[in-house]
Image (cartoon, rainbow, N blue to C red):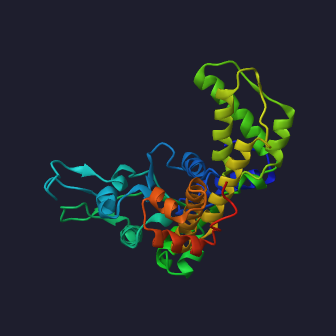
């Protein structure tokens, strides 16, 4: 973890205090702000530092497999259970169990986790007796779980179990001076990883790093540095913020952040779908030079359906197409 800003130092000081308290922790923050790094720092500075740190990507576990992934199973528990399998909870015994994207858990997954958190007892699939473990729980979310709980999209009782201690990872735009420090760290990492000579940033690029809002946070900065390092032939890396590709990329990141800020799942999905539909239809209509029938043929849909979409999205049938 690298930084010297007031927001960063405040976060690291809180991490040190939280690490000494062996209680559940909830981390919240925008995507790319380093929540997993913060979780690992809590683990490594705590009493369980020599025990396992087991991350669980809640958004990647299918609903039907959630109990099997968490609790494991015994041989013969179901058709393909040819041997015993430890669940993630058992693997984390005596250590830390990190639930990343905990807001992505389905209602069934939330119930399973809540039941386990009540006394840290669980029963593997196909087992008749309960088993006990001793793990520290750290959970992370891109969304505000309190707001999700208020609208019924996250269990309030589970929130109370997870939010004993709380840490909010600050976005990079609030960490004055840190983007430059991180960029210089990433370029050194590139040099070591790819075995290439050390490269340096043009002063104008460093000024832009300091002024840019970084909607994708540290992950966006890291990806940008890696790409520019690999594509720059000379020793000096110079990024032109007015370059069309950079503008398109920043607009895309701004749209993604806008969608992430929408806490209601259905509303966020609708906005993403509408954004896709509008861009797709503009491209198809441009190709068809404003001819709806030809555009429908290109899109592989009925003219009536395409016409309804055009009307719904407010797309002009003529005037924008060469």
Q: Residue at x 54, y 65 (%)?
A: 292
Q: Closest to the observer: 286 or 44?
A: 286
Q: Closest to the observer: 123 or 215?
A: 215
Q: Residue at x 36, y 58 (%)?
A: 133
Query: Residue 120 falls in which quadrant of the image?
Result: bottom left
Name the image quarter holding the N terminus: top right
Q: Closest to the observer: 264 or 84?
A: 264
How many marks are shown on the rendered structure?
0
Place of residue 311 in the rendered image (x, y in percent of width and height, measured from the top left): 58, 74
The answer to whether residue 84 is above or below residue 140 is above
Is 144 situated left or right of 204 in this image? Answer: left
The answer to whether residue 27 is above or below residue 314 is above
Is 54 situated left or right of 26 in this image? Answer: left
Query: Residue 288 falls in which quadrant of the image?
Result: bottom right
Place of residue 313 in the rendered image (x, y in percent of width and height, measured from the top left): 60, 71
Place of residue 198 in the rendered image (x, y in percent of width and height, measured from the top left): 71, 21
Place of residue 179 in the rendered image (x, y in percent of width and height, measured from the top left): 76, 44
Q: Residue furthest bottom?
A: 151
Is 158 situated left or right of 120 in this image? Answer: right
Name the image quarter holding the C terminus: bottom right
Q: Using the rendered image of the protein, determine whether residue 257 is visible from the camera's viewpoint.
A: yes
Q: Residue at x 31, y 54 (%)?
A: 87
The answer to whether residue 95 is above or below residue 128 is above
The answer to whether residue 229 is above or below residue 20 is above
Q: Using the rendered image of the protein, determine whether residue 13 is visible from the camera's viewpoint.
A: no
């Amino acid at each position: 973890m690298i930084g010297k800003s007031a927001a960063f130092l405040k976060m690291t000081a809180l991490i040190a205090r939280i690490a000494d308290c062996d209680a559940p922790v909830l981390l919240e923050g925008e995507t790319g702000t380093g929540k997993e790094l913060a979780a690992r720092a809590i683990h490594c500075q705590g009493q369980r530092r020599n025990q396992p740190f087991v991350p669980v990507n809640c958004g990647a576990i299918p609903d039907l497999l959630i109990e099997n992934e968490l609790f494991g199973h015994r041989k013969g528990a179901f058709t393909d259970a040819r041997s015993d399998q430890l669940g993630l909870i058992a693997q984390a015994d005596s250590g830390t169990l990190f639930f990343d994207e905990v807001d992505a858990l389905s209602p069934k997954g939330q119930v399973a986790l809540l039941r386990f958190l009540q006394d840290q007892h669980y029963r593997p699939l196909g087992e008749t007796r309960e088993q006990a473990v001793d793990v520290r729980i750290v959970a992370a979310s891109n969304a505000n779980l309190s707001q999700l709980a208020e609208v019924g999209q996250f269990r309030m009782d589970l929130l109370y179990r997870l939010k004993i201690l709380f840490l909010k990872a600050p976005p990079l735009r609030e960490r004055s001076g840190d983007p430059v420090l991180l960029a210089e760290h990433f370029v050194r990492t590139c040099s070591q990883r790819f075995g290439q000579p050390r490269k340096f940033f043009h002063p104008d690029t460093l000024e832009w790093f300091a002024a840019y809002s970084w909607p994708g946070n540290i992950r966006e900065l890291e990806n940008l540095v890696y790409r520019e390092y690999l594509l720059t032939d000379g020793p000096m890396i110079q990024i032109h913020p007015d370059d069309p590709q950079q503008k398109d990329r920043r607009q895309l990141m701004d749209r993604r952040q806008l969608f992430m800020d929408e806490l209601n799942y259905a509303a966020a999905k609708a906005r993403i779908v509408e954004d896709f539909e509008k861009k797709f239809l503009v491209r198809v209509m441009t190709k068809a030079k404003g001819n709806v029938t030809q555009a429908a043929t290109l899109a592989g849909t009925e003219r009536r359906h395409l016409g309804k979409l055009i009307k719904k999205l407010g797309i002009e049938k003529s005037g924008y197409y060469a």
